[in-house]
Image: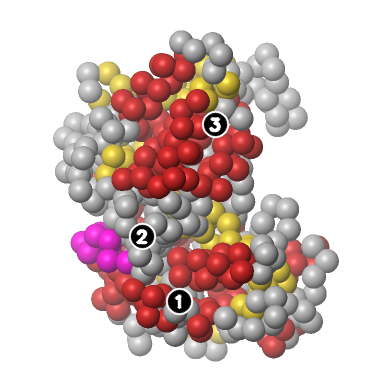
Amino acid sequence: MTRVLVVGSGIAGLWTAIRAAEAGCDVTVVTKAALGDGATGWAQGGIAAAIFADDAPARHAADTLAAGAGLGDPEAVRVLTGDGAARIRDLIRFGVAFDRDDSGLARGLEAAHTRARILHAGGDATGAAIQAALVGTVRRRGLRVLEHTTLVDLVVDGGRAVGISAIAAGRAGGASTANSDAVVTLRADAVVLATGGTGCLYRHTTNPDVATGDGVAAAARAGAVVADLEFVQFHPTALAIPGTPLISEAVRGDGAVLRDAEGRRFLLEVDPRGELAPRDVVARAVWRRMAEQGGAPVVLDATHLGADRLAGRFPGIDAACRAAGFDWSREPVPVVPAAHYAMGGVATDLDGRTNLPGLWAVGEVARTGVHGANRLASNSLLEGAVFAERAARDLASAAAVPASVPPAGDPTGHAGPDAAARGVSERNSFDAHQPAAAVVDREALQALMWEHVGLERDAAGLAAASARLDAWRAPDVVDRRTAEDRNLLDLARLTVAAALTRTASVGAHTRRDAPVPALERQAA
């Protein structure tokens, strides 16, 4: 029986675990918080799929490729959109109660989609509904789960991933204690990374605090190919309060508009699609208008939708706005961009295999090629389901044949073992011999990344960031926090190196020292 270790417990990890167990694998799920904690439960907008009569997978694919600024992998996108309907049916069988209207399943419109194809549950609680259904399935089926267990490194033997080292936190009231953390080694025939994204690289993010890039950093250290780390999606509408809670794109899909400090609707000056342009376009426009008005937030105006519609369609966002002191049915609310999603990650084939035998990656940690330089709204949950399903089918054999992923130095911007793992390990080795070097400070790192590697970058700022990152050393790993800080430092170095290498502006990677995208140039 194939022993499978799934690291992570969002949609991609739990889906893989459930399906692999059904295929006869002996599955263990490892998660560094409680089962169900993570970004999946925070997803508001919904899940995109071409299941309606006026739509087609080919149309969804065209929208996905267009949003990705021409860098998406057409075959990966074909798989994503073609398998969408089947995965929606699976979710319904898992127990997800999608919202309905008089025509059947209700659907919404989001930016850069040419059809209304976004399914939602509980109004703006789609991710929570999916997470609850998958967690319930895992519990009912008795899958082995190790909670509060943090990935430290992959264990590689003979050129193959054979397990992980991890920190198992003792729990006193749910929290680790100073003397109760223990490093353990968990061995398996196959390791699946499903550790999510990297939002905590930045001072402002819509992500939960578990999004520290653990899987990408560990994979790079082990010699796996990583790719496209320069492509970080910043969501244009996070509520401008501490914690920057997300205001879903679905609100703009329902007709909300963005206004500047003078009350002017400004997006149409940038793109004829206005608030429904791709996220990278909208986020840059918001960022630049904020700069023009001295850093003051812009506002999202949904007042014309009315209190009943806002509370009924977006109950979670409505509650968050009111808790922050805003009645968004009567006044526009201040919004700012925040780090939201990582398009890059561990490079995989269409079955989740990496170049390192024994290692698979699924979900946001993986770079499947479907997002290109900018993710189309509501494709993230779909990606998790579609590629987890494929990975689970592949895992039963757990063959040692590596995936066909690009080698180091590939011109598309991949960073392979030589450019990634070796560079990270050499710098950390150098730091270890420099007792005067300061241990990385998480808040300082996040501020540095926000300033120099945020929505807009240039060579001078990236070089300054690189030098500062090289002057820090990783902490000794003794608990979850220090493991995360080490990963954030490694990931920041890799991200800056990738951003320096890609000298042109494309999608979410905007260089001040390179021409702006053609559409924005024409609109200016």
The residue indicated by pointer 3 is 484
Vertical comparison of 124 with 100: above or below? above
Give the mark count: 3
Residue 514 image label: 2
Left of 68 or right of it: where is 179?
right
Nearer to us: label 2 or label 1: 2
Q: Amino acid at mark 1?
A: Ala
Q: Secondary structure at mark 2?
A: loop
Q: Nearer the viewer, residue 373 or 293?
A: 293
- Please check the rendered image and state whether residue 76 is part of the magenta-colored stretch, yes or no: yes
Point out the tag, 2 or 3, that comes first from the N-terminus: 3
From the viewer's perspective, is 345 left or right of 355? right
Mark 1 to mark 3: distance in Å?
35 Å
At 61% from the left and 46% from the top, the residue drawn is: 203
**Magenta stretch bounds:** 69-77
In this view of the protein, can residue 125 be seen by the observer?
no
Name the secondary structure under disc 3. helix
> Which sits in the foreground, 317 or 516?
516
Q: Which residue is tagged 1?
A: 277
Residue at left offset 16%, top offset 35%: 401
Mark 3 Cα shell of 10 Å, populated few (<14), some (14-19), many (≥20): many
Give whichever of 171, 339 is nearer the camera: 339
Which kind of residue does numbered mark 2 sit on? Ala
